[in-house]
Amino acid sequence: MMCSLAPGLGNDPRTDAPGNSEEMYMHIGRHDGRIEVRPIAGSIGAEIHNVDISKDLDEATVGDIRKALLDHCVIFFRNQRLDAERQKAFTRRFGKIFIHPNYRGMQADPEIIVITREAGDRKIVGEEWHADTTMMGEPPLGAILYAIEVPPYGGDTLFANQYQAYEALSDGMKKMLASVRAVHSDRMVAGPQANKNAYRATKVREDADWRETVSTHPVVVTHPETEKKLLYVNASYTMGFEGMTEEESRPLLDYLLQHGHRPEFTCRFRWQPGSVAFWDNRACKHLAIHDAGPFRRVMRRTQIAGAALG
Ligand SMILES: O=C(O)CCC(=O)C(=O)O
Ligand SMILES: [Fe+2]
């Protein structure tokens, strides 16, 4: 993948010359086989440089990428060349590929969702603040989105850090939420009643055999890897709190949803062809901005299977 430090270089007498070793180190440092992590905002998101993710990466590099993902909630790569097979191979380094039940039979390859936004589409995939696919008992742990065709402007994606959303709540609210579970359903985003397909190019299951999937998750989830607490409700799937009516749940749920994307918890990613976003689907929410007007936008997404959340 990347150049590694030449063996024995440290013994080269030339590097011991005054003023020389530092310069040499900096030169090598850019190519020493380690990824470079550059945060893009104060609380979430980092660009990762010095790695070609279409290549067979060694374990150490995959470990560094995983660490960057856990540290920053979403990471971005630029100027990558990924065909579907290479994207799937990269995805598999982080877990099993998740097959999305609501796109089954709707796309050529069940392991891939091509998200196409045609000029003038009146709806798009992911235009509300959400984590992906949380109606599942075991929601995906992450997703990898690769930009194939992007508008000259518009069509950015926002991400919000849900650890910080949790941390910013008062002690009283944290205490109250500690034992509350929320009900998540896919009835707002798929099935005939959701009625998305008439308005957008990316089709989801709306056939008569479609059935709603419902699961409950804690409102405050402990991240299985970082072991930090985070706020886990979202506008696309969360219907209300377990044991309460949707009407009773609404005011507090609305408050938590709004709170979860305060500007200081967010970053905004501007796409170019070949850009990749890789998000931790437990630690952050995201939103596709519906402002691409007359332009086409084509993205390829893979998802990584996750585990039940506690
Ligand atoms: O198109 C985007 O920017 C994001 C869409 C989305 O929500 C997703 O891929 O999960
Ligand atoms: Fe999404």
Image (tube, rainbow, N blue to C red):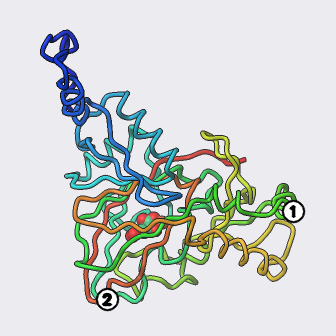
- Residue at point 53%, 58% (across, down): 43
Q: Which mark is residue 267?
A: none
The type of residue carrying mark 2 is: Gly
Lower sequence index among marks 1 and 2:
1
Residue under numbered circle 1: 172
Q: Is residue 51 above or below residue 302?
A: above
Mark 1 or mark 2, which is nearer to you?
1
Image quadrant where one finds the N terminus? top left
Seen at 25% across and 29% down, the residue is 32
- Total residue callouts: 2
Circle 2 SS class: loop
Point out residue 166 in the picture as x, y percentages from the top left corner. 70, 59
**Mark 2 = which residue?**
293
For the residue pair 19 and 100, the one nearer the viewer reads as 19
Residue 204 image offset from top left, x and y in percent? 44, 73
Q: Is residue 7 left or right of residue 179?
A: left
